[in-house]
Amino acid sequence: MTSNPSSATTYAVVLIGGGIMSATLGALLRQLEPGLSIALFGRLDDVALESSNAWNNAGTGHSALCELNYTPQGADGTVDISKAVGVNEQFQISRQFWSYLVERQIIVSAKNFLTPVPHMSFVWGEDNVAFLRKRYEALSQHPLFEGMSFTTDEGQMRQWMPLVMQDRAPGQPLAATWHPAGTDVNFGALTHRLIDLLASKPGFDLNLAHEVEDLTPTGDGQWDVAVRAVHGGGERRVRAKFVFVGAGGGALHLLQKSGIPEARGIGGFPVSGQFLRCTNPDVVSQHHAKVYGKASVGAPPMSVPHLDTRVIDGRQGLLFGPYAGFSTKFLKQGSWLDLPRSIRMDNIGAMMAVARDNMPLTKYLIQQVMQSSEDRLKALRDFVPTARKEDWELITAGQRVQVIKKDAKKGGVLQFGTEVVTGGGGSIAGLLGASPGASTAAPIMLTVLQRCFADRLPQWEARLREMVPSYGTRLGQDAALCAQVRERTRTALQLDG
């Protein structure tokens, strides 16, 4: 079924999903071409209620300062820092875009969504101490990681993380790295600021409690978008010259419905998560850092245990986790039928191959689901030896959907990270996957622009360089520009380190 062109409102851009990704793309496009007509459709009653919500994620500004899974160790003992460098470069792009908005007073201040919080790695056991030392030696020589410190001295660690070191059993080999340039990011608050920015100018239509149910190519390079009002009020259709599917876990279904060949063969594997949260001021005041450890054998990268300072709406709290789980929902407020409805003839082979080849992950998830409250408390006490059950409450995090893709050798592979899918001659793009996700929203949206607005890039390039001075350059390969960018964003965003 297609709509009558004379009865459908046509937008230059339709954004699907009310999270940080749609908000970032919308804000970029508004700066590049203010006259573009943009509509956003979100299925919930407000923006940033799924994975972008502050308590649904750890709020880590992922820059690889502390995340050990970004620096794998090879069989020969060497530590590969290439992924860490790439992740840090991407976060620097996000920092540059935020700095541009603040410097031009498009956003008054970054303080309501960005807080300086040191990033730390913490390990125990001789092998892990040796690994962390090698990691530090490799990273500290790189200009993006300048300022990192390493110690095995317990006195120094007590200064960096007193709560973690309090009443810790003596005699165990310990090591930690510390970097002052880490951040805690309230992606929910940032999403609201970006949406407010869009809504403050004409040419933007915000449609909350509206669910996009179908996407149909019109044959003339546009898209017919079928929308249903969640609380009644019927259905309607709009036209779009470009569609961005930034609906988190809901993106896969819509990309499948679009019929673009690029979405064929892609499946999704949902992983749910939980955190322990503490808001007791006596406990919270003893910790000011994001401390990341090593993942358990068989655990997915997103399940690296960490103890995080969170600053949300001016109040500090602590999160520990994540505790992984399994749900067939693709969204926290999704349907139990999301997973079975995503299985199709073109992706079932890849999904079965992934199930066959990832038994350690399956075992890990089963163990996590079966955990008791005492099991979770025991894991917490690896980081906080003095933790009391009454100070911590269990909360459910946002849902993550890992990408499954066909593979010529294995049949299918499970991918961790984020992936941009584009099709329709650049008239549609969607985002799949998870961490580092929100932290890299700006560089991911630059990828969308490069793939889908290539004809406009020449006229946009000067403005892009204003917003992101490192645009088109690898910061990791230009020490002078790296230092300049870090100092500029530190000043603009009022960050220490």
Image (cartoon, helix red, strand yellow):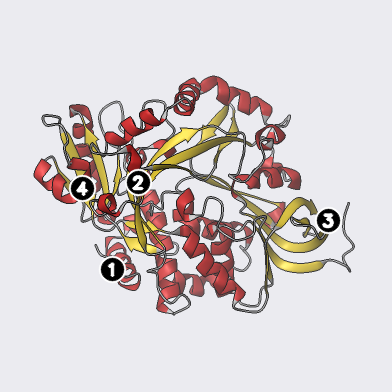
Residue drawn at (26%, 56%) of the image: 143
Task: Give how far apart the Cα atoms at labels 2 and 3 are.
Answer: 43 Å
Label 2 vs label 3, nearer the camera: 2
Labels 1 and 4 touching (C-beta < 8 A): no
Label 1 vs label 4, nearer the camera: 4
The location of residue 451, given as percent across then percent down, is: 60, 56
Q: Is residue 60 left or right of residue 77?
A: right
The location of residue 185, given as percent across then percent down, is: 40, 58
| Lower sequence index among marks 2 and 3 | 2
Q: Amino acid at mark 1?
A: Glu
Query: Residue at label 4?
Result: 161
Q: Secondary structure at mark 4?
A: loop
In the displayed structure, would residue 286 be above or below residue 323? below
Determine which quarter of the picture holds residue 485.
bottom left
Q: Is residue 354 left or right of residue 157?
A: right
Query: Residue at label 1?
Result: 487
Task: Give how far apart the Cα atoms at labels 3 and 4 are.
Answer: 60 Å
Label 3 vs label 4, nearer the camera: 4
Label 1 vs label 3, nearer the camera: 1
Label 4 vs label 2, nearer the camera: 4
Q: Amino acid at mark 4?
A: Met
Task: Give how far apart the Cα atoms at labels 1 and 4 are.
Answer: 26 Å
Q: Secondary structure at mark 1?
A: helix
Pick the front one: 121 or 351: 121
Task: Give how far apart the Cα atoms at labels 1 and 3 are.
Answer: 49 Å
Query: Residue at label 3?
Result: 219
Q: Secondary structure at mark 3?
A: loop
Residue drawn at (88%, 67%) of the image: 7
Q: Quadrant of the C terminus?
A: bottom left
In the displayed structure, would residue 405 be above or below residue 112? above
Task: Give how far apart the Cα atoms at labels 4 and 2 are.
Answer: 24 Å
Query: Residue at label 2?
Result: 84
